[in-house]
Image (tube, grey):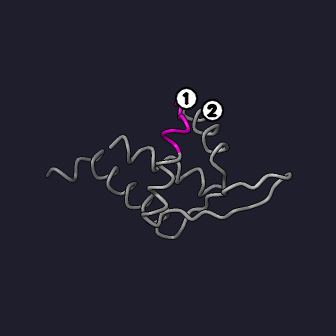
Amino acid sequence: MIRNLSDIQILRLVENQPMWGYMIKKQVESRFGLKLGHGALYPLLKTIEKKGLVTRESQRQKGRTRLVYMITEKGKQYIETYKEILKEQIEGTDVK
């Protein structure tokens, strides 16, 4: 479940706007108060990319090449499904 929460938070960030890894790391730290090391972030990004939840694109910005991550339709559906499951669990309708 913790892994899914990390997936969801990253997906929510890139749903709002495409981001590169370092920007995602800084946003997670500032918004959620979680320390996220590069050794955890990049494997996580690779995993959600393999699942088809994000795509990445190489972009040149300020003389640097960055891999910018963007959410896919499948990623948006993943977020919505997760919201519904969470809602059912909170309301207790999944155990009746």
Image quadrant where one finds the N terminus? top left
Q: Is residue 30 magenta?
A: no
Q: For numbered disc 2, what is the local secondary structure?
A: helix
Q: Are marks 1 and 2 in contact (CB under 8 Å)?
A: yes
Whether 89 is drawn above or below 37: the answer is: below
Residue ranking furthest to the bottom: 73
Q: For numbered disc 1, what is the local secondary structure?
A: loop
In the image: residue 93, left or right of residue 42: left
Which residue position is annotated with label 2? 30
Residue ranking furthest to the left: 96
- Tag 1: amino acid: Gly
In the image: residue 92, left or right of residue 69: left
* Residue for point 38% across, 61% down: 81
Residue 54: horizontal and vertical position, in percent? Answer: 53, 62
- Few, some or many residues within 10 Å of mark 2 (<14, 14–19, 20+): few
* Residue for point 46% across, 69% down: 74
- Few, some or many residues within 10 Å of mark 1 (<14, 14–19, 20+): few
Whether 83 is drawn above or below 41: the answer is: below
Residue ranking furthest to the right: 62
Which residue position is annotated with label 1? 33
- Tag 2: amino acid: Ser
Residue 27: horizontal and vertical position, in percent? Answer: 63, 39
Q: Using the image as rendered, state which of residue 17 and residue 60 is in the foreground.
A: 60
In the image: residue 83, left or right of residue 89: right
* Residue for point 60% across, 35% down: 31
Instruction: Identify the magenta region.
Output: 34-41
Whether 26 is drawn above or below 17: the answer is: above
Residue 28: horizontal and vertical position, in percent? Answer: 57, 38
Whether 24 is drawn above or below 60: the answer is: above
